[in-house]
Amino acid sequence: MKEPIIFYFAIPSRYAYLAATQMDAFSRETGHEIIWTPVDGNELRQRSNSDPFNGAPPSGQYRSPYRENDLADWVDYYGVPYREPPEADGDVWWKGFGWEKMRMIALAALAGQDLGGSIAWHRALYDLMFVRDVWPFDLPEILAEGKTLGLDPDELAAKIQAKDTASRLTQNSEAAIAAGAFGVPSFVCADRVFFGNDRLPLLRHHLAKLAVD
């Protein structure tokens, strides 16, 4: 039986969005089950002491315009839809968006998953974030989207705010760190971790070697 691949992702992550668009095809090609596991990306980075967004960028890959050009190249390479979220408060969108709202979205990803939304729910949240012309992207938009997928808005709202959901989201981050992850997207297969959308070819190569051994 093939080892499953744990896909650690955060909805507000652009590169996790890119990776998410490839998961169905990747699973079909490799025969490995993908276990979608939402985390709070900020919490994961802070708990692993690996936050490139806190202070000056540690590497040129996090600076403009390199990062924007790299993202555009991947969007073109995959042939997937993408729109950069509008700027907020006159700043780059993710600063105006705020870490608290990003955590709420991470909680929504886990809450909707628990209520049966499954992968379709995660894809819907990514569409709200990076594809459709929806802004602001906040709790009302999330609850309305859940309703289209058959999730009760009141039940979803309560689940998002539940202490157990927050606790389990933190547990997801702790499990990712224990496996060796330090950011999103990360892919864990057995005792190996691959970080970043651009590591998918190396993950595919690793799985092919496992099939031969």
Image: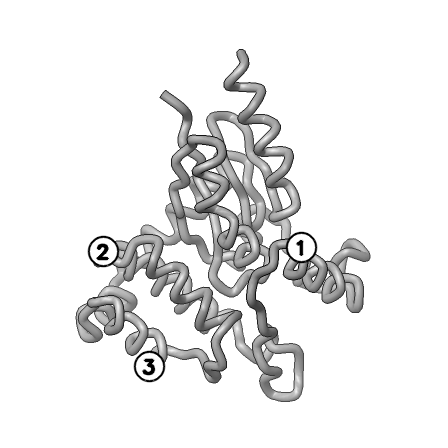
x 37%, y 53%: residue: 169
Label 3, residues with CA under 10 Å away: few <14, some 14-19, many ≥20: few
**Residue 163 percent location from the top left of the image:** 27, 61
Amino acid on which disc 2 is placed:
Gly
Depth check: give the residue in front, 64 or 209.
209
**Residue 59 percent location from the top left of the image:** 79, 54
Asked if residue 100 can be seen in this view, the reply is no
**Residue 119 percent location from the top left of the image:** 35, 53
The mark nearer the N terminus, 3 or 2, is: 2
Q: Nearer the viewer, mark 2 or mark 1?
A: 1
x 60%, y 77%: residue: 93
Query: What separation in Å lies between label 3 and label 2 (alpha carbons)?
Result: 19 Å
Amino acid on which disc 1 is placed:
Tyr
Residue 51 position (above or below residue 210): below
Question: Would you say the residues marked 2 and 1 are in contact, meaning their CB atoms lie under 8 Å apart?
Answer: no
Residue 77 got which mark?
1
Residue pointed to by mark 3: 140
Question: Would you say the residues marked 1 and 3 are in contact, meaning their CB atoms lie under 8 Å apart?
Answer: no
Residue pointed to by mark 2: 116
Amino acid on which disc 3 is placed:
Pro
Under circle 3, the secondary element is helix
The mark nearer the N terminus, 2 or 1, is: 1
Asked if residue 118 can be seen in this view, the reply is yes
Q: Is residue 116 left or right of residue 64?
A: left
Query: What separation in Å lies between label 2 and label 1 (alpha carbons)?
Result: 32 Å
x 47%, y 68%: residue: 102
Residue 67 position (above or below residue 39): below
